[in-house]
Every structure is written in C-alpha cells, then in structure tokens.
Amino acid sequence: MENSQKEKSNAKYSIIVPTYNERLNIALIVYLIFKHLPDVDFEIIVVDDGSPDGTQDIVKQLQQVYGENRILLRPRPRKLGLGTAYMHGLKHASGSFVVIMDADLSHHPKYLPSFIKKQMETGASIVTGTRYVKGGGVHGWNLMRKLTSRGANVLAQTFLWPGVSDLTGSFRLYQKSVLEDVISSCVSKGYVFQMEMIVRASRKGYHIEEVPITFVDRVYGISKLGGSEIVEYLKGLFYLLVTT
Amino acid sequence: MFGTLRKGFEFHLGTEIINIRIPSDGSRIDHELEASMIHVPFVSASVFCIHPRNDEMKHIVKIMALLVALSAIWISLLQISVIPDSYTWLLPLYFIITLGCYGLFMVGIGLMQFPTCPQEAILLQQDIIEAKDFLKTKGVDVGSD
C-alpha cells in the first residue's frame, strides 16, 4: 500500500454542540466524532440547556469513557437560545479553531476531516458546510420543504449578495478569533442568527470557503418549520438587508 | 455621465451630487454631455443622508445607489425620447416583472437540481447501530428515549 504523506494539523479544535433533549443523539454524535477524527487534537463542548430527559447524565457517562479533558460539559439552567449557547461554549474553548454543529445527527461528523482539510489548504477564516451544491444534499425533505428552502435561498441571494450558497446552515468551522469578532456583533435569534453570522463575516471581508455536506433530516426528534417561521425569515432578511 | 455615477457610488457617495444633463426646452440632443444641466436635488439629498460611519459601505447603500443610477437612466430616457414615452413610462414595471420572473426561474431550476442523498440515510442507520453496539459495551446507556 502506498504510504502517502497526510498533512496533519497541529491545531486544537473545539467542537461546540448545543443540546436540548438529545439524550440518545449526543452519545451517537460523540462516538462518531471520535471515530472520524482519530489523529486530531480536539475537545467536545456540550452546552446543555437543562434538558429534562437526562442528557447531562449521558454526557457524564461519556466522560468516563473518553476522558473529561476531551468532553467538556458546560450546562446552563434552561433554554437560553442558540447564540448565547455558542458564546457560552466559546468561553470554555481552548482550541484555536471552533466547530459548531447540531446534536441531532443532521450534521454527520464524517465531514469534519473535510472541513479541517479545506481550512488548511486555503487558510480560510471560516469554512461553512453547504447542502446545495453537487456532492452535498438533503434527505427526508418533502417538496414543500425544498420549495421554501430554495425560495428563501433565492431571496437571500438576490438581496443580500452573501457570497455563500447555504446561508442558514449551522455546520461551520471558524478560527476562534473570527468567531469571537463576528458573534459579538450579532443580535438575531434562531436560524436568522446563522444567516447574520455569515453575512456579517462576509461584509467584514473574512475569507470564507465552502464544503459540500449531506443533511439527513432528524432521525430521532421532532422537526420545527411552520408558517410563522416564514414570517420570521422575511423579517430577518429585511433586518440583514438594512443593517449589514 | 455613467462613469461619473460609477465613481460616485464607490468613493464619493455622500459628497458628490449626481447630475443629469437634460435639455430644458424638450428638444432632442445628440450627445448627453452637451445639454444643459438640471440638478436632481431630491436624489442628492437622500444620498447625503446615508453616509457610513466606518470605512466599509453598508450593503443597503450599494443597493440604493444602484436604484438611484437606474432611476437616473430612466429619467434621462424619458427626456431624451429615444424610445417612445409610452414604453419608457412602463420600464420600471418591466424591470420588476423581469426580476420576479428571474427569481421564479431560479427557484424552479434549484428545485429541479436539488441534490438529494437517500443513500446517506442508510449509512446513517448503519452508523447508529455501530455506535450503539460500541457504547453499550462501554456502559453508556443507549436505550431508546
């Protein structure tokens, strides 16, 4: 077998995973991260918002298996929002790079090596996963979901000129200093927050790269997308149009 | 004139007045630069109000500048009468309709080309089984929730 020289990153990566009632998924995610990043120095920061289903107990069990220095449990008393969850995790992050991802298995850890590789190759400040290019994709979306997603994307591209193909995605790798800079200037909530982060980063001139990712809709858990979400999106879009 | 407009919104927005040369007697002109000047004061006033506090220009300013430039072209077309006035008055409407059609077209294209990955669901199920088996042996509680 040919022994190819694999470039190894010497940096430390902090993976922030916000959780709420992800008792089963968090264990699966942790296993998969360890499986797909065997030669990488990383830590997983679980920011749990007081899950009633015992997510934190499972994390403690995982800490016994993998080590308390690899899995950090930094809980909060109740649901306080995604943006503040990232900021909370960021305070405890010791790596020079920060990865944010969802705990519900819609983001598969097998793409983590491609994020790291892309960042090393291009020296980008942010690497964001995109579901909308060849090599990426979604599964488990009906026509309505695809239509709203595509419509939202076209609107955002037409009015915001963001420079990325997937605005609402939340599977991203940031340089720690870049994340700290961008997150301090964002005020939105939910997925508009994800949009605001990437648009503000784009306006500030940060080098952003994309990698294709696949997105399998929630295997365990309930998805949330309704009519009020569309209104929220349009309001968020207008806000971003005027303030960024 | 267009060169001036371009330069205006890149560097001098907020300080430069956008001028449109329109003959005051309604006659046709051969070359726009040779006609007499009429300011478009309301345009320059709105431009004066939007000046960025930092070095970077806000996105909305770029969009407004683009709209202003398009409006200027439209107004000058109305005055120059190269195209019959009845068509010229409807140009903004045509523009909006074209934009809407373009948007719908892009949505349709994107919908047709939407990348899907049914095999990923199967791979994910396999990963879940593998993860559960490993974690059970290590004493982590992976019963169904």
Image (cartoon, coloured by chain):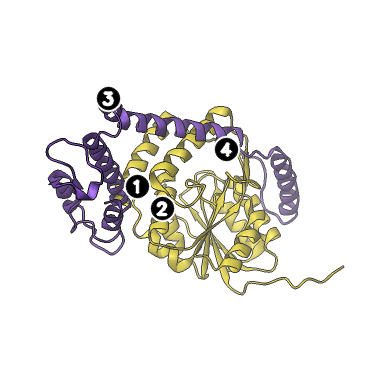
From the viewer's side, name the closer residue of B19 and A128: B19
Tell me, yes or no, if residue A140 can be seen here: yes
Q: Position of residue A29 (x, y in %)?
A: 63, 52
Q: Quadrant of residue A228?
A: top left
> Which residue bears the numbered disc 3?
B86
Q: Amino acid at mark 4?
A: Gly
Residue A240's label in the rendered image is: 1
Q: Quadrant of the C terminus of chain B?
A: top right
N-terminal of the pair, mark 2 or mark 4, is 2
- Chain given the colour purple: B
Element carrying mark 3: helix
Q: Quadrant of residue B27?
A: top left
Q: Amino acid at mark 1?
A: Leu
Quick one: label 1, few (<14), some, or many (20+) residues within 10 Å? many
The reply to whether discs 2 and 1 touch (Cβ–Cβ < 8 Å) is: yes
Number of numbered discs visible in the structure rendering: 4
Q: Position of residue B53 (x, y in %)?
A: 23, 61
Q: CA distance from mark 2 to mark 4?
A: 29 Å
